Structures are given as C-alpha cells and as structure tokens.
Image: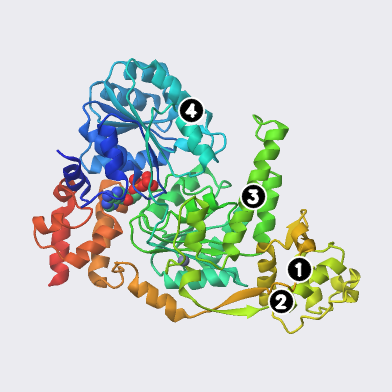
Amino acid sequence: MTKEEILRQYYGYEAFRSGQAELIEAVLAGRDVFGIMPTGAGKSICYQVPALMLPGITLVISPLISLMKDQVTALNQMGVHAAYLNSSLTPGQYRKALELARGGRYKIIYVAPERLMTDGFLDFALHTELSLVSVDEAHCVSQWGQDFRPSYLKIVDFLHSLARRPVVAAFTATATRQVRDDIVRILELDRPVALTTGFDRKNLFFGVRQPRDKMGEVLKLLSEHRGESGIIYCATRKSVEEVCDRLIREGIKATRYHAGLSDEERTKNQEDFIYDAQPVMVATNAFGMGIDKSNVRYVIHYNMPKNMESYYQEAGRAGRDGVPADCILLYGGQDVVTNQYFIEHARENEELSDRELEIVKEQDRERLKKMTFYCFTEDCLRGYMLRYFGEQAAGSCGNCSNCIGEFTELDVTDTALAMMKCVYESGSRFGAQAILDCLRGSSSQKIRRFGLDKNPCYGCCKDVTIHRLRQILNRLYVLEYLRQEGEPYPILAMTQKGRESVLGDVPIRVTIQIPTEKLVQQRRKKGAGYTPAAEADEGLFAGLKRLRLALARENGVPPYIIFSDRTLTDMCRKLPRTKEEMLQVTGVGEVKFERFGEKFLEEIRKGVE
Ligand code: ADP
Ligand code: ZN
C-alpha cells in the first residue's frame, strides 16, 4: 500500500496536511527526521503511517500515559495492532504485553522512557527488528524546555545499546532555538530532515477581553456555546472551585480538575469530560497534557498564563478536529502580580545552581512580559503569536478580536501625562489602584492616609472612566514608560525610558473597539469553509451524536475515537446513502466503516426521511 492508500483506508482522510508527506517520505528513505509542529497539527500520522509500511516494529517514546492509552485505543479501533508499556500496567499485564510483543503481535508499541533500559524491555528490543524509534514531546530532553525529564536522557543510551540503529524521528511543539538545538544534539539525530509546519491554526479564533466582571463574561461566553464542550483554565485551585461552583449553580454541566483533588476524583472528572457527560471542564494548568479530545469548541482563560508557550498549548486544545473554535483570554491586572509571585517563588530545582536559577527566573520574567503584551497589543493577535514563535505573519488575519472589530483611535496624551506625573510626584511608592484612585479624585480613607489627596494630579481625571484609565495604563506598560515592580504589593514605577522621554512630543493614542455583537455573529456564519454543526441539520447531527455516544459506551472508548465532530458534520453535509458514499466522508476508513458504517447509514436514512 502507498502512504496515500493507508491514509484513506485506515484513517479515512483524503489528503496529508502540510509537512506530513515530507516527513513520512524521509523516514521511508531511512533519514532521521525532526518535526516541529503545533499541537493538533497531526504529528502522530507522521510516524504511524511509516510504521505501517516499514518491515519491523516502531517504538514510540512518550511521557504521557493518558496519551499513550488514547493513541493505542484509536489504533486498535482502526484495525492496527498496537500496545503500550508503562506504569499503568500491573506487572502481570506488562509481562503479558511484552510476551505478545516478542511474538510479533504489535506493529506499534508505545513505551515510557523510564522503561527503555530495564532488563526485560532491553532484551526484547535486542531480539526484534526495530525499524523506527519515534520520540514524542522531544523537548523533554532539554533543560531549557519547560518539561525537562531526566528519563529522556536514557533514550540515547538505549539507541547505543542496539545492534543496529533504527531511524529516529523526533517531534515537539516547542519552538525556541535553544530547545531545538538541544534536541538534535542530545538525541544525536543524524542530519535530520527538519520541518516546521506553520504554527498557525486557522480554525482558532483568538480573543482578549478585559471584563470588569470575569464571571459574568464567562457566563456570556458559555451562553454562546450552549451544549458545546469547552475548557476554562484558572490560575489557582481556589478560582477553579469558585468558577466551577458558580457554573453548577447556573445549571451548567461542569466539572473540575486540579492537583488538590484525589487521584480518583481527577480520573473520574477527566473521563466525564472526555465522554461528554460533563462538557465543561474548569481546571488549572495541571489539566490537559495528553488530552486529545477533538471536539473542544472553546478554551477560556480566566487568568492570563505565565507565558505564550503555555497559552498556545492550552488554547490549542480547542478545535483539534479543524472545525472553528474560540480561544478567549480574560485579562485582569491581578494576573500579572500572581504570575510574578509564581516566578519569584518557583520551587527551587535542586539541580540548578543559584546562578542558573537566576537565569531561569530572568527568562521567565521576560516571557511573562511578552505574554502581558499579547493582552495589550492592538495588532493582530495571531500575528503577534506567530512572530513570537519565529514565524512571519500577515498584518491582519480577520479571525482575532483585534482584526474583526471596528476601531477608532483616541488621543489620550493629556491623561497619560497626568498619570506619569502622578506617579512621579508621589515618589513611585504606590500601586496602580492607588494612583488611579488619586487621579479620579477618590476620597477614600486610604487615599487620604497616603496623602495622595495632596498630589498635584489629584482628581484631574475625574471625568475619565476607570476602564479607560486602565487601558491607558496598559498602553504605558507596552510603551515601557511605566512598570510594576515588587511583591507582594507591586508598586507602579517609571522605567528608565519613562524618565528620559519627553512625553508629549509623541502623542499617545489608544485604540478603542466598537463592540459589535453583529460582527462576531457574521464571523461565525462565514467562518473559513465550515458548516457549523448548528447549521447542518440540527436534528440529524444530534441523532448521530446520540448514536456515537451509545457506540462509545458499548465499546468502552471516548466518543471522538468512534468519529470526530468533523466527521459527523461531514456526514450531515454529504448525506451518504451507500458504503461508497460513506467512505467519501472525512474520517471514515475501511475498518471504521466495517465496525460502525452501517449503523450511521441507517441513522442518516432515518433522519432524511
Ligand atoms: P498532534 O499530536 O500533532 O497534537 P494529532 O496527531 O493528535 O496531533 O492529530 C490531531 C488531529 O488531527 C487528530 O484528530 C488527527 O486524526 C487529525 N489529523 C491528522 N492528520 C490529518 C489529515 N491529514 N487529515 C485530516 N485529519 C488529520
Ligand atoms: Zn488577527
């Protein structure tokens, strides 16, 4: 079979995505490869397809137990023999799996890195034909990455102990130069064919909002996504609890996930989410590694994350099926402070010297700054993000909150000047709130106690809304005239640049968006080549979903393993009547058809009559 035939037969996909064919060809030609692809781009196909074409066995090294399980389940559903070897198996199950592997039962084996150098596994590896070793999440070898795992260093020892070196393929979604260099060097990739597929995920809408009432905003967003699956990320366990409780009180089917829960509850809540029993997940960043739920329609960040890498990874869990999805970040001034606190109190990594630790912290501060600017930028959000990851980007994407609104510019030089002056006159000793209160002429006790009512700028902005003042303050951060420093009570201070600039020479403007609900609705309707489920025959779509859920329960797998939302939507659009027509639907391969095809055809027939 050719690689195209495999794609069609097993996966039911029409064409390779950008980068996939090239990497597969290179592996088949015996070259090492290095794929740098964002989450959801389709890395697994890059090693699974050659695995099915090469003579021997393919090992996939992955740090993520849940992901292994998911991938193996998906492969078995497609009719490919695959297994995983990790700590979730009992010793008995592990021995059994290894025995079957020895007997040549599996074409693809997922293995945790810490297993590689164990006697049992090594013995197996030495007596079998290994064609390909694929290293998933390859950035785990690098100390500069965010998820350094010492067990990843064993991979190269393992390769050395083999009689013949297999082709090695490495994959990561991390883009920084330093980490990339580390991966090639530490894994000893041999002149790899390296490929960066665009980080852009066109189906994701990116938005930043600065609501006064975050909870209200969440409820509003959820009402636009009624019945759909989504994730709400919060910075702390406490806010996870608060948000989740509130949603449940509002009658929304939500569940929660954070490190403070028992293993049992975490597993249960995660499954409830994956199986769509509780379509809304409220979680800390502990949630999501290895979750491959393809029908997540929105990811809301209740707080700003600590850097763009985290944000893109978390937001990227939306829309993995390629159908439009929303990624909305709700920014609040406190978010910067919380993150600064996390950085300064990062649990000390014992392997690092004081100097190294300081370097790491400095990097973290810089990353936080870039993340904060994402929230304030008035340029295209997608463009900002792509440039951060080292890519070129067009000026305007038409699919982010900065590109769809209608804008108007406002000259705020006078107010900005007053703000700077107020900070200066008060000796850079107060936090943002106190300065803004002073400008607005607040008569609170605090203001009087601090003597801020004597400040020459006291009350000089009493006609400006607090919202606008915050926006101007943000602008001054971006221009690097002002910054926050110190904790736990950060104060507002002038930067070197702020002191040196002769303000007023250059006018300061902020862009204000004319919020038009209509624009958002238009976008939803137009959305790049997409028929939203809601617009397809709603009754039929619901029927197909019900059938999928029933089949999922029967087979003990998550619904999206049966068919993705995209596949169901395509069924609604194409209304297939025969096997041949059904095989034209994206995501329907031969084996899947054999298993489930007729049932879905029947449901469609019923629905159309
Ligand atoms: P990654 O590991 O890069 O995060 P996956 O390999 O899990 O991404 O793929 C993400 C989703 O895209 C999966 O649902 C997968 O089946 C789908 N996919 C991958 N390649 C293709 C393709 N060529 N055509 C259609 N869908 C694809
Ligand atoms: Zn844009």
Give the amino acid at mark 2.
Thr
Identify residue for label 2: 413
Where is residue 422, by image quadrant? bottom right
What's the residue at 26%, 54% (across, down)? 563
Q: Earlier in the sequence, mark 2 or mark 3?
A: 3
Q: Is residue 318 left or right of residue 515?
A: left
- Cα distance in 3D space between marks 4 and 3: 26 Å
Looking at the image, residue 546 sits to the left or right of residue 35; the answer is left
Q: Amino acid at mark 3?
A: Glu
Percent across and percent down for residue 297 are 40, 62
Residue 294 visible: yes
Q: Give the vertical position of 563 relative to 458 (above or below).
A: above
Indicate the secondary structure of the residue bearing disc 2: helix
Compared to residue 603, the image places residue 126 above or below, namely above
Residue 171, located in which quarter of the rendered image? top left
Per the model, the C-alpha gap separating discs 2 and 1 is 20 Å
- For label 3, the residue is 366
Is the residue at mark 2 in contact range of ligand 2, meaning its CB lies under 8 Å from it? no
Q: Quadrant of the N terminus?
A: top left
Task: Out of 498 and 183, give the one closest to the viewer.
Answer: 498
Real-space Cα distance between discs 4 and 1? 49 Å
Mark 3: few, some, or many residues within 10 Å (few <14, many ≥20)?
few
Name the residue carrying label 1: 433
* Mark in the foreground, 2 or 1: 2
Residue farthest along the front direction in this orientation: 505
The x, y position of residue 383, in whole percent, is 48, 60
